Amino acid sequence: MMLKQNRAAMLGLIVGGLLLVAATGVHARQVTMCTLNWEPYYGEELPREGFFTDIVRTAFERGGHSAQTEFMPWARAMLEVKQGDRDVLLGAYYNEERAETYIASDPIFTDEVGIVAHEDLGLTEFDSLRELSDYTIGYGRGYSVSEEFDSAEYLDKEPEESQVLNLRKLFAGRIDLIAGSFASIRYVANREGHDVDELVFLEPTLKENTLHIMISRAIDDGDELMADFHDGLSEIRSDGTYDRILEEMGYK
């Protein structure tokens, strides 16, 4: 009788242990993320690699995973995640093409996007993008600005590897306009020593883009990772951690 009781007790411990492992996330692993340097949202020289990186990393941690970030050109980052060589594309605007290529998260942050000119151009507003067809517009290679801008073949669009280079070209008179995130353009202009007061942020804005993460469809546990991320994101929003990160990084 005692032997049977011991066996039963041992079996109970084993089953209980298995249930505990399942509950605490046996699938937990290191998540590999990649993106470009896009200040002030994320960058390898920013505190905690930027507030957006910190929010995403914290959400993954709450979901049971650790996450590390590698910085690289944007086109390469998109390809790495598409192929499954990295798990997560950190910080991307949503569009239908990307939603088919990657598993897109819920919105994490909202970014105001539009057209920027130098004050010498004398332009402050426009009614439609077609009015800008006589101007050369710099933008980030591989960036999605807005659906209308992205598909506007009538525009003279000149891709560049970074907004740093676009701003240098704008202040040197080599391009007329820049399309992109207003916050990023302001930040980079300040950091590079340009006079931000000489920049004109044209009205209306093109879009209030929502920033997401995109998980590879080429990895086996992509849906599970996204579910864990969403659980963690919901938790840090509800307990105040999300707002605290923004406050600590100066964005709230």
Image (tube, rainbow, N blue to C red):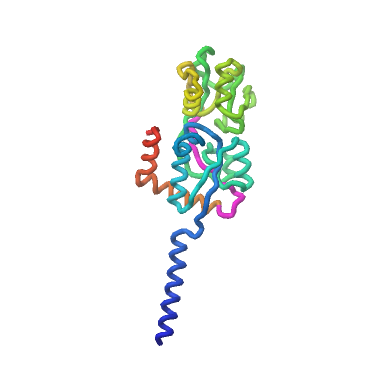
Residue found at x 57% / y 40%:
96
Snapshot quadrant of residue 55:
top left
Residue 53, how many percent across, how many down?
A: 47, 40
Residue 163, how many percent across, how many down?
A: 55, 27
State the count of labels.
0
Q: Is residue 73 left or right of residue 204?
A: right
Q: Is residue 156 or residue 76 the one in the foreground?
A: 76
Snapshot quadrant of residue 72:
top right
Q: Is residue 131 visible?
A: no
Q: Is residue 220 magenta?
A: yes
The N terminus - image quarter: bottom left
Image: 218 above or below 243? below
Residue found at x 59% / y 46%:
86
Residue found at x 50% / y 40%:
212
Q: Is residue 68 magenta?
A: no
Residue 127, how many percent across, how many down?
A: 52, 20
Q: Looking at this rendering, what residue extends furthest in the left direction?
A: 239
Q: Is residue 102 visible?
A: yes
Q: Magenta residues?
A: 207-221
Residue found at x 39% / y 32%:
250
Give the dominant element type of the magenta stretch: helix, strand or loop.
strand
Q: Is residue 204 or residue 89 the one in the foreground?
A: 89
Residue 252, how many percent across, how many down?
A: 37, 33
Q: Looking at this rendering, what residue extends furthest in the bottom direction?
A: 1
Q: Is residue 98 left or right of residue 5?
A: right
